[in-house]
Amino acid sequence: MSAITPEIIRAHQLSEEEYRKILEILGREPTYTELGIFSVMWSEHCSYKSSRLHLRRLPTRGLRVLQGPGENAGVVDIGGGYAIAFKIESHNHPSFIEPFQGAATGVGGILRDIFTMGARPVAVLDSLRFGPLDDPEVGARNRRILEGVVAGIAHYGNCFGVPTIGGECVFEPSYNGNPLVNVFALGVFKKDEIFLARAHGVGNPVIYVGSKTGKDGIHGASMASAEFTEESKQKRPNVQVGDPFMEKLLLEACLEAMKTGAIVGIQDMGAAGLTCSTCEMGSRGGTGIEIELERVPQRETGMTPYEIMLSESQERMLLVAEKGREEEVFRVFRKWGLDAVTIGRVTDDGMMRVKNHGEVVAEIPARPLADEAPLYDRPRSRPLRRAPMDPPEFVSVSFENDLDKLLASADICSKRWIWEQYDYMVRTNTIQGPGGDAAVIRIKETDVSVAMALDGNGRYCSLDPREGARLAVAECCRNLSTVGAQPVAATNCLNFGNPERPEIMAQLVEAIEGMGEACRFFETPITGGNVSLYNETLGEAIDPTPVIGVVGLLPTGPPLTIDFKVPGRAVILLGGFGVCDPVRFGSTQYAKVVVGKVWGLPPALNMDYEKRVQAAMREIAAAGLAESAHDVSDGGLAVALAEACFGPTATGAEVELESDLRPEFLLFHEGPSRIVLSTAAPERVAEIAARHAVEAVRIGATMKGRLVIRSRGEVLVDRPVRQLRDLWEGALERMLRS
């Protein structure tokens, strides 16, 4: 056994204090394999040692919540005897190093989280962040990463057979060295058929199923717990390699094996691979697990115990079956052409014991390893902030040109080039796919549909992390309400820089507290999620980027879409014109794209008013009064009106805006709690709005082929819909070709 030197400890990203704790737990010096096991299980990626203390403040309970944080995915009751399992995960670091496989295996990992619970995956969404495609220094690299990530998501999802039905894609300089790839998945099952990752029944066999173990992904969890440096390209072997066809077989085999009743517990081998699955199942079950590595199916010869335990090869699961019923499980996996091998058993001593050819190479108490990792209350100062507070002087030269620039900008332009690569109709459940405010799928076994959306705004959070996180929750719930869905639960992915820097830790804590406040207020408990830290390159951190995914329920029926349908309908601004001042305007897309600067604070949010606007919108939708609806967000009212014109009929609008706001604010401020809708029954819409004590301003009517916006008689915008649409539709492809 080689001696454990200080250099080896540092190479495993363990501090001196953490190593001393290992010595206390073991009562001796660890073996090299044990050191590797501790390093991955106590990595930031697996242990949440910097965030766990603060995540406890998030609301996690609700009337519909069947399973909250702590399992592979959260579970919510949707009625009729059915439930949905859902979660969001990050694969940021791997996607920078190897964009295609990094993104592809991110999809594979979140899908396994869902069917490990016993649910069949039925939808995927993705939240993507990249550096600017036209950056003069690294634009070519950003374009390559974007193309690789999108191709990887499309490859895995399309081959597996799950629709990718929505998401978001944002471009900011802070993501130049750290793209963010956050993937959400949702599955459906009967609510009394939930499977948990727990090892029960002393003597029960521990069965390895799925793909063979190789050397890919070793120390992937540790890689995701460190900043990027000049040497990061050498970490390409740390990126896993996925096989979606193998995962499809694994899905069907696992769901069929679960039907036999022989499965006691199940856990996928994701981050930290066999290490994580064994110790977590033992810890959650209050038992121990003993395994023999000689029996682990391997695709490479001469693999060491260290490599086998830390490999993150994809498409693998660990099962605990009832003793004596192993053959029932093996029969199912043979049918699907997959390996299924008993590699160990459940014990009563609480130890994770690893043998190799009969020799014990690791023997660690499961609970301290899995659930008692170091917990840090890291120092924090004021949140990092680079932008000035005071606004510059600016005056629009042409509101029409401003609108053109915004519609052709990377954040706002059509993402059709991305989502056309995804099969978003497979399984024939998609009611509303990419391009809407929220995606909607029907649950065929019931009369209920599920709406889902992802939202996050790193620019807002860079100015005020707490308010930015609250705004993200509000917008996500508003997106669901705009299609008529009642938000019921949420999942989150917290993307931040190095938590050892007090100003970054402050961003994280403020964002968590803001998210908690908003989720509590909007009654959307967090059922699980992911924390991704150390998103830095050469000391430059990303903008704080908490991403929220909210799911909601609505009766199955035709979708309520963004686009105006026919001329002659009243256009209503539900929620009113909102408020804005020069300081709050500095966070807008207009400030970023047209003025070329960011300053000030995010838009102001009144959560009580926001909640009432959402309730009014849901009632309007349920009554069938809205022919179209679109929330006002990036780019403000002018962009929302333009996007509502981009439907198949190219129906435009003529609106008159009566407001004391300065024209730039009136057209382009991003204040929340506003929805543009068209209706043939404006009086009834007004009645519902009044009942909820919110404004419903009749600003104009739909018309054929043009968008005309006036303010107190002055024409601010007058453009053919087709001209605006051409700018918006083709912008992303033009950037990629540049």
Image (spheres, rainbow, N blue to C red):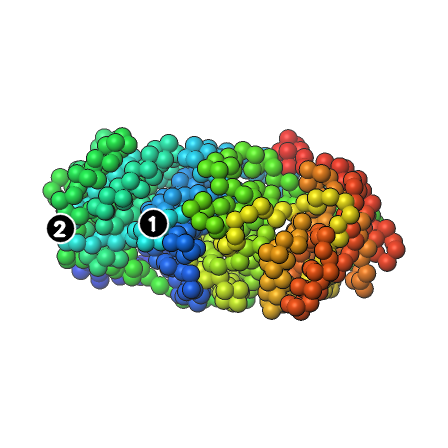
When asked about the image quadrant of residue 112, the answer is: top left
Nearer to us in this view, 586 or 567: 567
Q: Inspect this view and state whether residue 515 appears.
A: yes
Q: Which residue is mark 1?
A: 117
Q: Residues within 10 Å of mark 1 (few under 14, many from 20)?
A: many
Determine which of the numbered discs, if any, sits on residue 203 in the image: 2
From where the camera sits, is residue 55 visible?
no
Q: Position of residue 288 (x, y in %)?
A: 18, 54
Q: Amino acid at mark 1?
A: Met
For the residues carrying marks 1 and 2, which lies nearer the camera in this image?
A: 1
Lateral position of residue 391 relative to residue 474, left or right = right
Q: Secondary structure at mark 2?
A: loop
Q: Determine the residue positioned at 73% across, 39% down.
A: 650
Q: Position of residue 111 (x, y in %)?
A: 40, 43
Say which residue appears at 29% left-offset and 61% top-offset: 372
Quarter of the picture containing the N terminus is top left
